[in-house]
Image (tube, rainbow, N blue to C red):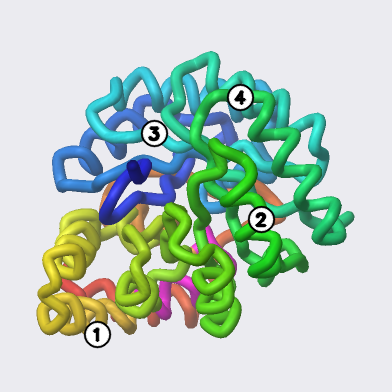
Amino acid sequence: MALFKGAGVALITPMHEDGSVNFDALKEIIEEQIDKGTDAIISVGTTGEAATLSVEEHVEVIAYTTKVVNHRIPLIAGTGSNCTESAVELSRQAEEVGADGLLLVTPYYNKATQKGLIHHYTEIANAVKLPCLLYNIPSRTGLTIQPETVAYLGKNVPNIVGMKEASGNFTNILRTLEFLDGHEFDLYSGNDDQIIPLMSLGAKGVISVLACVAPRKTHELCRAMLDSDVRKAAAMQIEAAELIHQLFIEVNPIPVKTALNLMGKEVGPLRLPLCEMEPEHLESLKSAMKEYGIL
């Protein structure tokens, strides 16, 4: 059974002006996401600025988010690392505080061979009982999980149940499905501009940045695809195209956090080395938000 079907939000981590985590704002954002139909919360992934949170903050955010969500929808914790030992420890702590699943990005900077990836993911998965999603995003990590590797892990490690696919490489996606050969394994789009293409191949939904600012519409787009209403889903995907483009006009999560502040959510600043948007990008983001009806 899939961890979730539909739109999972890649949640931002709100900050106070001094850079500390703003838990009051986090609670408000979580409640709004649930109220507007989001199907799952993904905590402390790329969009949640995991790279600049301390281990203590990382676990505290997951624990707090789990408490607020209170199993109303699935809570999937980002616990990946380029150090297997660190990922194991963080994954164990996420399990202890009540996460429903884990999102495990590929090792970055030091990378790994495909053999190393198999050992890395197997060791993490064997250390917990939670269902685990692989996270393939070579544009940020410099490393691709090859189709044969995905299929091996999906078939041989029982609690590796799916993957967030953000490579945009549809040849590899098709090869992955071919090598899985009907084995139950849940794909989720990691790119908001590719929700329909992946769901047309059987993906269960999206782990979405767009959902941070448009949770209801992102949920409805996925719901339309799950209900086989491709015409409605396509219209919604096209309607969101410019906003999606602007949400990635600079490195994520700079634009989406900026957008939330523009919407009055008061999610605060980013942690360096991420910084405020360039003025020309800010104006184009505002324009797209107005056109989409969220500003």
Answer yes or no: do the residues labelled 2 and 4 have beta carbons within 8 Å?
A: no
Q: Please, what is the three-letter code of the amino acid marked with disc 2? A: Tyr
What quarter of the picture does the C terminus occupy? bottom left
Query: Marks 2/4: CA distance?
Result: 19 Å
Tag 3 residue: 75
Tag 2 residue: 152
Judged from the image, the secondary structure of the residue bearing numbered disc 3 is strand
Q: Please, what is the three-letter code of the amino acid marked with disc 3? A: Leu
Query: Marks 2/1: CA distance?
Result: 35 Å
Q: Please, what is the three-letter code of the amino acid marked with disc 4? A: Val
Q: Nearer the viewer, mark 4 or mark 3?
A: 4
Instruction: Tell me, yes or no, whether the highlighted magenta stretch contains residue 238.
Output: no
Measured as percent of width and height from the top left, residue 187 is found at 44, 60
Tag 4 residue: 128
Question: Of marks 1 and 3, which one's residue comes earlier in the chain?
Answer: 3
Judged from the image, the secondary structure of the residue bearing numbered disc 1 is helix
Q: Nearer the viewer, mark 3 or mark 2?
A: 2
- Identified at 63% across, 28% down, the residue is 91
